[in-house]
Image: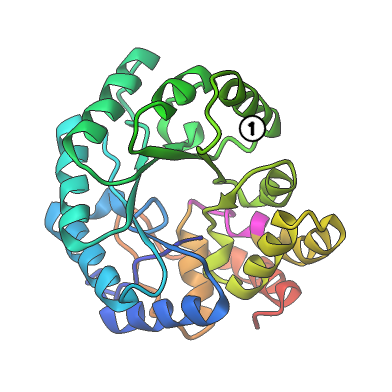
């Protein structure tokens, strides 16, 4: 699944022509689902109306061909509910909700927050744990507690800690929960995550190399370690260099370099620093995308 960028003109306004181009690129390349307006989609710099408009346009462009998962997390429970309602209204198939960032809620606060959103909006919801971004770590016991909520269907685990995956799996099994989705949010460890029983990956690299990512995931999910690792080796440069500066600065530069969209990005993010051009080009060559 791709954590899709939000294409913008150089003045920061939306470029929906490029969004249509990206949607077709992913569908033709075998991407399984599109995540709209998550971290990579610059959700933090979009106001409520912007956020809903990008979700709506993405759903319209995909036209039911693959699922659209809308990023609707917020550090305000009320705002997360409103964004999730909007996603349901525009026809998204599911929502991805990052843990409330900056205000550092305790684990019981996370439970109450996610339960409130799940009870308010009848749409499938995926938890998103990325403590490196949020300063808030959703622990395995909390994930398992929330997994018992009917429309909370999975978690995007972006710590990059494969031991965390094993702990969540063990606790879900002990609780008798067998239908909860476990999705990697860390490209560098995603291949091994799938080989150890994960169900998918929500990927930044997939923006740039969707065909290779789809093939790697298919091999890993089939238990074909040799093929999965061979493909993943060609992607390691992207997994690393797409984070030379804060995501989505490098990935937006890479997509502009590929001619798929302009290089627009919203402040306080800025275009990629010139010293990173060549390392990222080298990674793109290694992956065979330029």
Q: How is the image coloured?
A: rainbow
Magenta stretch prevailing secondary structure: loop
Going by the image, does 124 lie left or right of 241?
Answer: left
Q: Quadrant of residue 125?
A: top left
Q: Magenta includes 53?
A: no
Q: What residue sits 27% from the left and 46% below the top?
A: 123
Q: What residue sits 55% from the left and 23% below the top?
A: 176
Q: Quadrant of residue 17?
A: bottom left
Residue 4 appears in the figure? yes
- Would you name the residue on which mark 1 appears? 165
Residues 204 and 162: in front is 162
Residue 215 location, x and y as percent? 69, 69
Residue 193 location, x and y as percent? 68, 44
Q: Is residue 111 above or below residue 130?
A: above
Q: What residue sits 34% from the left and 75% below the top?
A: 62
Quadrant of the drawing holding the C terminus: bottom right
Residue extent of the magenta highlight: 239-246
């Amino acid at each position: 699944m791709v954590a899709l960028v939000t294409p913008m003109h150089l003045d920061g306004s939306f470029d929906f022509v490029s969004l249509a181009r990206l949607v077709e690129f992913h569908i033709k390349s075998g991407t399984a689902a599109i995540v709209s307006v998550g971290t990579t989609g610059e959700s933090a710099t979009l106001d409520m109306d912007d956020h809903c408009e990008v979700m709506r346009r993405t759903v319209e462009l995909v036209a039911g061909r693959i699922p659209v998962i809308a990023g609707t997390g917020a550090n305000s429970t009320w705002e997360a509910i409103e964004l999730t309602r909007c996603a349901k209204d525009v026809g998204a198939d599911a929502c991805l909700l990052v843990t409330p960032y900056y205000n550092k809620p305790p684990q019981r606060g996370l439970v109450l927050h996610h339960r409130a959103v799940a009870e308010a909006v009848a749409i499938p919801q995926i938890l998103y744990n990325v403590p490196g971004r949020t300063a808030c770590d959703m622990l395995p016991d909390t994930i398992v507690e929330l997994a018992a909520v009917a429309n909370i269907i999975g978690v995007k685990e972006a710590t990059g800690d494969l031991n965390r995956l094993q702990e969540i799996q063990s606790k879900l099994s002990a609780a008798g929960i067998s239908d909860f989705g476990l999705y990697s949010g860390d490209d560098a460890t995603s291949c091994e995550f799938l080989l150890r029983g994960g169900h998918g990956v929500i990927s930044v690299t997939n923006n740039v190399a969707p065909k290779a990512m789809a093939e790697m995931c298919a091999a890993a999910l089939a238990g074909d370690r040799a093929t999965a690792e061979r493909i993943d080796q060609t992607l390691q440069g992207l997994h690393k260099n797409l984070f030379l500066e804060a995501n989505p600065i490098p990935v937006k530069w890479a997509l502009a370099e590929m001619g798929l969209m302009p290089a627009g990005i919203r402040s306080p993010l800025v275009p990629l620093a010139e010293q990173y051009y060549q390392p990222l080009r080298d990674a793109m060559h290694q992956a065979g995308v330029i």
